[in-house]
Image (cartoon, rainbow, N blue to C red):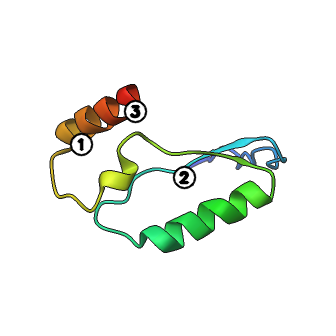
Amino acid sequence: MPEKHEPIKIPARLSPGDTIGIIAPAGPYDHDAFARGTGCLEELGFKVLTPPGLLLSLIHISEPTRLDLASRITSSA
């Protein structure tokens, strides 16, 4: 007997002013390309949210240590 599936739910379209969250890649990435991409999203009117420590991704350290460093940097600013 064929398995029944729920219909696909399509989320509402994003609108200017909505927030788009960016997660950290698993490895090093091109920071300039990332900045251009987030800049394009902001030019379209979106808010861009990135996790603390994302810009520290070129430093190969554990995630808990990276988050600790990020929190120290942001709290001292």
Question: What residue is rendered at 70% in x and 50% in y?
Answer: 8
Q: Amino acid at mark 3?
A: Thr
Viewer-proximal residue among 5 and 64: 64
Q: Which residue is mark 3?
A: 74
Please tell me whether residue 55 is drawn above or below residue 50 in the rendered image. Answer: below
Which of the two labelled residues, at mark 1 and mark 3, occupies the earlier sequence position?
1
The dot on residue 41 is none
| Badge 1 vs badge 2, beta-carbon distance below 8 Å | no
Question: What residue is rendered at 72% in x and 55% in y?
Answer: 42
Q: Which residue is mark 2?
A: 1
Q: Amino acid at mark 2?
A: Met
Front: mark 3 or 2: 3
Question: What residue is rendered at 60% in x and 69% in y?
Answer: 36
Label 2 sits on a secondary structure element that is loop
Across and down, in percent, residue 24 comes to 39, 53
How dense is the environment of label 1, judged by Cα within 10 Å: few (below 14), some, or many (20 and up)?
A: some
| Badge 1 vs badge 3, beta-carbon distance below 8 Å | no
Q: Quadrant of the C terminus?
A: top left
Viewer-proximal residue among 20 and 70: 70
Spatial distance from mark 1 to mark 3, Cα to Cα? 12 Å
Q: Which residue is mark 1?
A: 66
How dense is the environment of label 3, judged by Cα within 10 Å: few (below 14), some, or many (20 and up)?
A: few
